[in-house]
Amino acid sequence: MIDTALKVTGIDHVVLWVSDLKRSKEFYIGLLGMHVAHESDWQSFLRCGQQQVALFQIRDGSDVAPGREMNHMALRLESGEYEEVKAKLEAAGAQVSGRTGDPHCLYFSDPDGHRLQVLTPAEQG
């Protein structure tokens, strides 16, 4: 190992390209409880804990590429039991799936098809 290696202390932000910035902000703020750190007319940096999710509006007419720009983003939840969280996601219109043998992990997609995973508190231990 190199003695002069840089030491990462965390992830500052992850960028997701979106087709409708307003719709995506409503999803991440309204359903997932993030809040705006700073924004412009074509981008919005949303704070979640010490990290940020940056939503960038596609401006050149290209398509959003969920699954090609990243496999999935895993988000830790502050609270909530599996069935309660699953019900909230489904009530918001998300198609939710679990992971075989894991009672704390849920997968769903945002409005542009980016794959998201939420981990209920017991999974975070």
Image (cartoon, grey):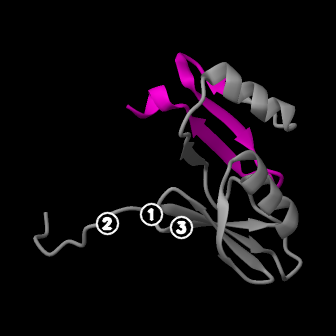
Circle 1 Cα neighbour tier, 10 Å, few/some/many (<14 / 14–19 / ≥20): few
Stretch of the chain drawn in magenta: 98-125
- Mark carried by residue 13: 3
Q: Residue furthest left?
A: 3
Lower sequence index among marks 2 and 3: 2
- 33 left or right of 30 in image: left
- Identify which residue is drawn at 61% across, 40% down: 117
Q: Quadrant of residue 60?
A: bottom right
Residue 11: mark in rendering = 1
Q: What amino acid type should be assigned to the residue bearing mark 2? A: Val
The residue to which callout 2 is attached is 8
Quick one: SS at disc 3? Answer: strand
Return the x and y of residue 44 as percentages of the image width and height.
71, 73
Distance (Cα) linking label 1 and label 2: 8 Å
Q: Is residue 45 above or below residue 88?
A: below
| Distance of label 2 from label 3 (alpha carbons) | 13 Å
Q: Quadrant of the N terminus?
A: bottom left
